[in-house]
Image (cartoon, grey):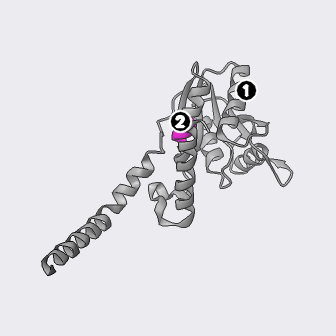
């Protein structure tokens, strides 16, 4: 009896040790399943998705335009923030950071999900005759939003480019509360998208 308890204790200790040793690569690997970040390519237009209040997405899109990857950045918003369209606030923020106001096209529509936002963006892109698109969003959002854009616009050549997100901690999402919330919420949304609910 004592021997079996000893083996159980050793097995549990080994399991704890393996978990501690390999936790970081395991968690990073799981987080990387959300990421579909590719190198930017020359495109007809850059679309910056709404929902980033740190400004990383709009600055990434603006920098890609400045580097010549596309002539225009479509900044869209899903709702009003204190009576202002997020798209306009984002473009103004980028202009204050030194980017030309001529880079930005701002639009405002009501969207309560990435599917609704992508649907509105795709309609605008079709109206403008755009075919190759760079979609900029937070790294953790690139996988799901890329699948949605490709599903809604199979005729378009969609390329995802990830912007940094302070809560994501360069893939070390478990390091703070906001990163954990982001990880679990994105997981739930990814499952819901696969199930189309």
Q: Is residue 143 magenta?
A: yes
- Residue 68 visible at all: no
Q: Secondary structure at mark 1?
A: helix
Quarter of the image with the C terminus is top right
Taking 1 as reference, is 77 left or right? right
Residue matched to label 2 = 160
Q: Nearer the viewer, residue 179 or 165?
A: 179
In the picture shown, does residue 183 fall above or below 148?
Answer: below
Residue 180 seen in render: yes
Range drawn in magenta:
142-146
Is the N terminus in the top left, top right, bottom left or bottom right quadrant?
bottom left
Specify the quadrant of the image occupied by residue 177.
bottom right
User: Which residue lies at the image location 32% right of the left edge and 67% below the top edge?
Assistant: 20
**Horizontal arrangement in the rendering, residue 141 relative to residue 91 (left or right):** left
- Identify whether 185 is placed above or below 122: below
Number of other residues with Cα within 10 Å of mark 2, as a class: few under 14, some 14 to 19, many 20 or more: many
Residue 72 disc label? none
Residue at mark 1 to residue at mark 2: CA–CA distance:
18 Å
Which mark, residue 124?
1
Magenta stretch holds residue 156: no
Q: Could you say where residue 104 lies in the image, as x and y percent from the top left?
A: 73, 36
Q: Main secondary structure of the magenta part?
A: helix
């Amino acid at each position: 009896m004592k021997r079996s308890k000893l083996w159980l204790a050793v097995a549990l200790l080994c399991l704890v040790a393996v978990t501690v040793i390999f936790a970081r690569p395991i968690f990073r690997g799981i987080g990387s399943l959300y990421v579909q970040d590719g190198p930017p390519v020359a495109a007809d237009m850059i679309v910056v998705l709404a929902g980033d209040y740190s400004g990383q997405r709009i600055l990434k899109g603006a920098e890609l335009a400045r580097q010549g990857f596309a002539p225009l950045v479509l900044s869209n918003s899903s709702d009003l923030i204190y009576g202002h369209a997020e798209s306009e606030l984002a473009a103004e923020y980028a202009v204050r950071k030194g980017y030309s106001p001529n880079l930005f096209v701002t639009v405002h529509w009501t969207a309560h999900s990435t599917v609704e936002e992508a649907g509105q963006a795709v309609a605008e892109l079709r109206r403008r005759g755009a075919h190759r698109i760079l979609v900029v969003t937070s790294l953790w959002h690139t996988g799901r939003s890329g699948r949605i854009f490709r599903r809604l616009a199979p005729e378009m050549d969609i390329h995802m480019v990830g912007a940094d997100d302070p809560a994501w901690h360069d893939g070390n999402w478990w390091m703070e509360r906001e990163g954990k919330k982001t990880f679990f919420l994105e997981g739930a949304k990814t499952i819901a998208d696969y199930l189309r609910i």
